[in-house]
Image (cartoon, coloured by chain):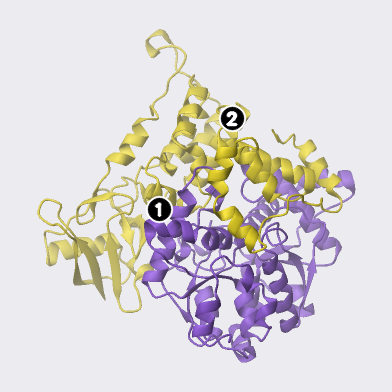
Chain colours: A purple, B yellow
Amino acid sequence: MSATLLPEERPLDAHRASRSRETKRYGFFPGCVAKESCKELFNSTMLLADKLGIELIELTAASCCGASVVNDVNRDVARVLNARTYAQAEALGLDDVITICSTCTGHMRAANKELLESEERMDQANAILGKFGAKYSGGVMVRHLLWMLIDDVGLDNLRSMVVRPLNGLKVAPFYGCHIIRPENVNGWESARNPHSLEDLIEALGGEAVDYAGKTRCCGFHVQLEKDGIATNMVGQNMRMAKDNGAEAVITPCPLCHLALDGYQQDAGARWGRTDLPTFHLPQLVAYALGVAPEKLGLNKHLVSPREIMVQRELIS
Amino acid sequence: MAKIKLDLFRFDEAVDTVPHRDLIEVEVPEATTVLDALETAKAEIDGSISFRRSCRSAICGSCSMSINGVTALACKTNCRDVVKDDGTIAVDPMQNFQPMKDMVVHMDPFWDKYARLKPYLQPKDKDSEHEIERRVSPDDMKKLVDVANCIMCATCYSLCPVVSVDPAFAGPAAIAYAYRFIEDVRDAKRDERIAQISEDYLWLCAHCYACSYCPKHVEPNNRIVDVKRAAIKDRVMMNERGPRHALVVSKTIKQTGMLAETEVILGTVGRFNVVGLIKALAPLGPRMALRGKQPPVFVKPIPKVDEVRTIFEALEVPVS
């Protein structure tokens, strides 16, 4: 299916080649969750970067992207916080910032788009950044690791680097809303029928499972608002994945990971047991490229991938 | 001309207990709409195929249906863009609604939620006591123009994952339409309206942006955020978890530069709300702790966190 937008409505920078692509030195924005409750995501990303021979330069003084929540209290604050992060990347000579979270991707891209499209907003941001001597000149683009893997490393190249193929493991992709929607912010691929994760799963020797839940919401952002909502959203999506033959799930978003991994057991009461282990994107790629599985933090998952990995002869 | 196989949901609540599917092949021009393909099937092959339609040009909002699993206006969807590799297009009734006959659904829950808004202007005085027209400046009107484009097609409501698990949620269209009156300078019921839409679970929006697929670019996703900001500005129902969550996230970012997960949970649910915390965390909390996956209790502020505080202060961002 095609995107709903006309070509001229889609963002231009999503596939742009960057200077970082030449130098193999990228800005790296891990986001809050990879530094707090999903440290295994941060670690496996760094191990994957080593394998790929690229340098991820962490923007250590960067703040939270706003997580889609600060927009609820103020229309400008997320934009200016992210402008500060871009200014830091520019000061380090980096024009390409890689994220490992769908929510960071979407909201950092939205902020960048707002800044680049309006001189007034850029001036407002720089007037505030000027108070502490920073300036953003608009030269940064934000991409998810997933996009970088496909555009810069390339699927063929990845396929040739696989030393431990996934042996036909049936993996259900779970995109996470903010890496695909809104389309006029992300636009790297069709939001209604994305296939980058499927392509990646197949390049790693797995089998991609198609199901309607792959572009739906995990419920993370309302897990605290009312009991049971996120649990049911997780149950609904994991039921569809399981019924279509999935043995595991892969997600580019740690928020989705927390919801899918955390709530599946509780969701079982209404939706039936699914027990699908939920891999972070870099965990599975790093595994296939030869990083030792015990370094990937797989033991941190609440739904253990151990049984299915043994069954598929991925670990002993 | 192109051959297209329509994979149709068929069901008549008057006679059927379970739905079935019909595969109907039609020959249509290369660049035809899904609605035209359905019209062709109805005219040439099976006159009993039922679907709502009227204007054929994305104005009336009748022909929303699920096309290959995603709700859209059939009259605005080109077959060429959606046809699968095997030449089929799956057409189903909108999700989140009870089917009536084929693609026709019972729209009542959608209209009920709309009616609850009192979707008409409620000025301070009656029109009969008002001798001249009620004038609005172009600037005040500009922000309402996008919402006024809503054709109530229910595409957003059908795509909403929260509606699918909790029918009490007002849904994107109703919240967007609430915004249309909340921000209307002529209306005198702003705070009542904010309170009412908050009671209808404004804060249950999951930030998934599925409603950004709105065929009329109303962008309910952005209007929902506008209504939340109005609620915080006017301090309406501030003791609910939704506004508390937004404010505590804002506060932890101001203090540490990071979204401090533990503090956000305590601040949203209420740090002295022991029963609430147990319900929100058990048995997940202990399970996460066992795996070494609990968020840290204290988050170390990022380097140069003063810069973040400067941003919050310059923009006068509320944190409580």
Residue drawn at 54 percent across, 74 percent down: A305
Q: Position of residue B120 (x, y in %)?
A: 39, 26
Residue drawn at 59 percent across, 88 percent down: A159
From where the camera sits, is residue A124 visible? Answer: no
What chain does mark 2 sit on? B
Image quadrant in which the N terminus of chain A is located: bottom left
Q: Position of residue B121 (x, y in %)?
A: 42, 23
Residue drawn at 73 percent across, 60 percent down: A35
Residue pointed to by mark 2: B238
Picture quadrant of residue B133 = top left
Picture quadrant of residue A240 = bottom left
Residue pointed to by mark 1: B159
Q: Is the residue A72 above or below the residue B257 in the image?
A: above
Residue drawn at 66 percent across, 86 percent down: A290
Position of A315 with respect to A45 (left or right) is left
Q: Check disc 1: other Cα within 10 Å, few if <14, some if 14-19, many if 20+.
A: many
Say which of marks 2 and 1 sits in front.
2
From where the camera sits, is residue B205 visible? Answer: yes
Q: Is the residue B239 above or below the residue B8 in the image?
A: above
